[in-house]
């Protein structure tokens, strides 16, 4: 009897893991598309993060784990003389981000790259600002990923690591990781949209 219940619980967890993985962690197929639709509802977090980052009109902005592309769309409104680049390992997310931002991509204001934070295909000191939202916990080595972002930020450039209020994540744990990756001026912010840690390259 107990064995049967345990088996049912284990099966439920496995199904939940499968759904979470395919919807949000490595979005793929129909579940990934559904996850992307849900993620696209939150404009509040990226708008708040862009405020904290103080994005200027001529900035070049990188978004790591750019998902369905809302953050890039909002960043392009603020960096209207600059460029916005997104990188994400999910083809489903890139397709959704492409559909959302087609006119800006055609106008060469937004660029999308299939790839991950482990090996971002950008030269040293390329970007003024970098942001990553609801993604860092998925990276295989978080400090190594942050170091890569530091490499491709210009000296003095800024990074924002943020999570939605629904994640119930505290920004405290990102302070150490940002410092270990070589960022300075680390500050932690909690607001209604979520939590965010800022650092300077
Ligand atoms: C929960 S989604 C968040 C998407 C978007 N930033 C948002 O907040 O709506 C996590 C994203 O991180 C991406 N991701 C996972 N591992 C990654 C990695 N190693 N490097 C870069 N992005 C990654 C996933 O493909 C997915 O699009």
Image (tube, rainbow, N blue to C red):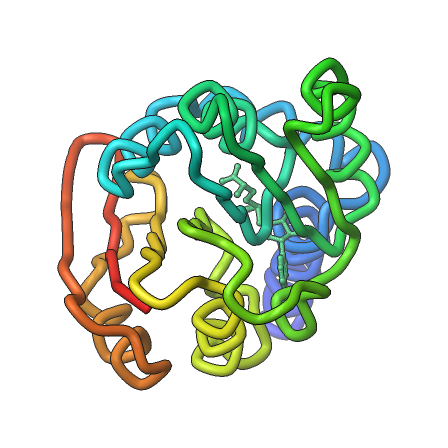
Q: Tell me what residue is drawn at x 34 percent, y 49 percent.
A: 162
Q: Relative to 143, is 165 above or below? A: above
Residue 83 position, x and y percent, is 57, 35
Q: Tell me what residue is drawn at x 64 percent, y 74 percent.
A: 118
Q: Quadrant of the N terminus?
A: bottom right
Q: Relative to 90, is 155 above or below? A: below
Q: Quadrant of residue 103?
A: top right
Of 158 and 99, nearer the camera is 158
Relative to residue 76, is residue 119 drawn left or right?
Answer: right
Q: Tell me what residue is drawn at x 29 percent, y 39 percent.
A: 165
Q: Tell me what residue is drawn at x 68 percent, y 20 percent.
A: 104
Relative to residue 47, is residue 123 drawn left or right?
Answer: right
Q: Quadrant of the C terminus?
A: bottom left
Residue 141 position, x and y percent, is 53, 81
Of 55 and 21, nearer the camera is 55
Of 126 and 40, nearer the camera is 126
Relative to residue 192, is residue 53 drawn left or right?
Answer: right
Q: Quadrant of residue 176?
A: bottom left
Residue 95 position, x and y percent, is 81, 32
């Amino acid at each position: 009897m107990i064995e049967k219940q345990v088996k049912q619980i284990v099966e439920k967890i496995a199904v939940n893991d499968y759904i979470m993985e395919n919807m949000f962690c490595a979005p793929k197929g129909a579940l990934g598309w559904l996850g992307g639709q849900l993620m696209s509802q939150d404009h509040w977090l990226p708008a708040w993060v862009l405020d904290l980052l103080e994005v200027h009109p001529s900035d070049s902005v990188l978004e790591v784990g750019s998902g369905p592309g809302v953050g890039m769309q909002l960043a392009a409104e603020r960096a209207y003389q600059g460029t916005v680049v997104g990188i994400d390992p999910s083809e489903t997310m890139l397709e959704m981000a492409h559909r959302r931002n087609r006119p800006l991509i055609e106008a060469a204001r937004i660029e999308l790259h299939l790839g991950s934070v482990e090996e971002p295909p950008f030269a040293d000191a390329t970007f003024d600002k970098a942001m990553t939202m609801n993604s860092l916990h998925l990276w295989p080595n978080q400090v190594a990923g942050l170091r890569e972002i530091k490499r491709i930020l210009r000296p003095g450039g800024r990074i924002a690591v943020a999570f939605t209020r629904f994640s119930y994540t505290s920004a405290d744990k990102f302070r150490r990781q940002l410092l270990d990756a070589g960022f300075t001026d680390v500050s932690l912010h909690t607001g209604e949209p979520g939590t965010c840690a800022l650092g300077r390259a």
